[in-house]
């Protein structure tokens, strides 16, 4: 693993998810970088492409939840994610307090959408699942509600000999 940061081990792993995604997307003609919370993320065709590691074991993306119900990831998901499938009861008390949102969100146009690139990985097994899609996040909740998601193929170097047959079939490769 190589990272541009001088951060300690765990933080370096956190940083590399943004760096790798930005490097992979920067060649697209419609891609443009933006800095959010000290990390470079890419906007492609009006949508922020944002990575999220949701688990360290092989579990479905539908079990994904954020570590916290507030902060940049939560605010980004609520403000730029898809419209909720089921709206909240409106008692006429007003909208979400825009002043309480993470300050870096002001760098994004309010009409910018969000695509999450969600993955499960561990040091021992590598990347086990990789998907992308649209997920909503209800106010005060940490669980992502996926409106649409689809698996992405993993590069062959991420297929490990200790993967199960089911995992190998899902990513379209045979275990080595």
Image (cartoon, rainbow, N blue to C red):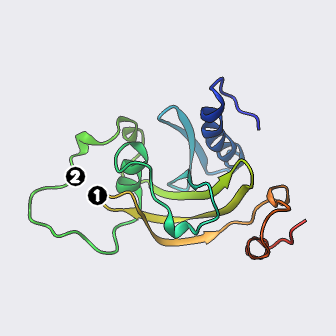
Q: In this image, 141 relative to 161: left or right?
A: left
Q: In this image, 87 relative to 60: left or right?
A: left
Q: In this image, 121 relative to 62: left or right?
A: right
Rounded to the nearest angstrom, the CA distance separating label 2 from label 1 is 9 Å
Q: What residue sits 33% from the left and 69% below the top?
A: 84
How far across and down, in percent of the image, does residue 88 sit? 22, 68
- Residue marked by disc 2: 96
How far across and down, in percent of the image, does residue 94 sit? 13, 55
Image quarter where the N terminus lies is: top right
- Residue marked by disc 1: 139
Q: Earlier in the sequence, mark 2 or mark 1?
A: 2
Provide the secondary structure element on which disc 2 rests: loop
Q: In this image, 119 relative to 153: left or right?
A: left
How far across and down, in percent of the image, does residue 132 sit? 59, 63
Q: What residue sits 51% from the left and 55% below the top?
A: 47
| Marks 2 & 1, CB-CB < 8 Å contact | yes
Asked if residue 22 shows in the view, the reply is: yes
Residue lying farthest left?
A: 92
Q: What residue sits 47% from the left and 57% below the top?
A: 114
Q: Specify few, some or many for label 1: CA neighbours under 10 Å numbering under 14, 14-19, or 20 or more.
A: few
In depth, the one of 120 and 76 nearer the eye is 120
Image quarter where the C terminus lies is: bottom right
Q: What residue sits 78% from the left and 65% below the top?
A: 163
The label shown at residue 173 is: none
How far across and down, in percent of the image, does residue 13 sit? 65, 38
């Amino acid at each position: 693993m190589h990272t541009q940061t001088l951060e300690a081990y765990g933080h370096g792993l956190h940083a590399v998810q943004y760096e790798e995604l930005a490097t992979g997307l920067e060649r697209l003609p419609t891609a443009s970088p933006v800095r959010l919370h000290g990390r470079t993320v890419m906007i492609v065709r009006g949508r922020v492409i944002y990575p999220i590691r949701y688990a360290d074991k092989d579990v479905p993306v539908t079990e994904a939840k954020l570590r916290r119900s507030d902060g940049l990831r939560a605010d980004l998901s609520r403000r730029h994610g898809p419209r909720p499938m089921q709206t909240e009861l409106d008692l006429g008390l007003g909208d979400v307090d825009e002043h309480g949102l993470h300050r870096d969100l002001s760098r994004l146009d309010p009409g910018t959408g969000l695509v999450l690139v969600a993955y499960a990985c561990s040091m021992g097994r590598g990347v086990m699942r990789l998907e992308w899609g649209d997920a909503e996040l209800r106010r005060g909740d940490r669980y992502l509600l996926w409106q649409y998601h689809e698996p992405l193929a993993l590069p062959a170097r991420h297929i490990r000999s200790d993967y199960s047959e089911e995992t190998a079939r899902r990513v379209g490769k045979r275990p080595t």
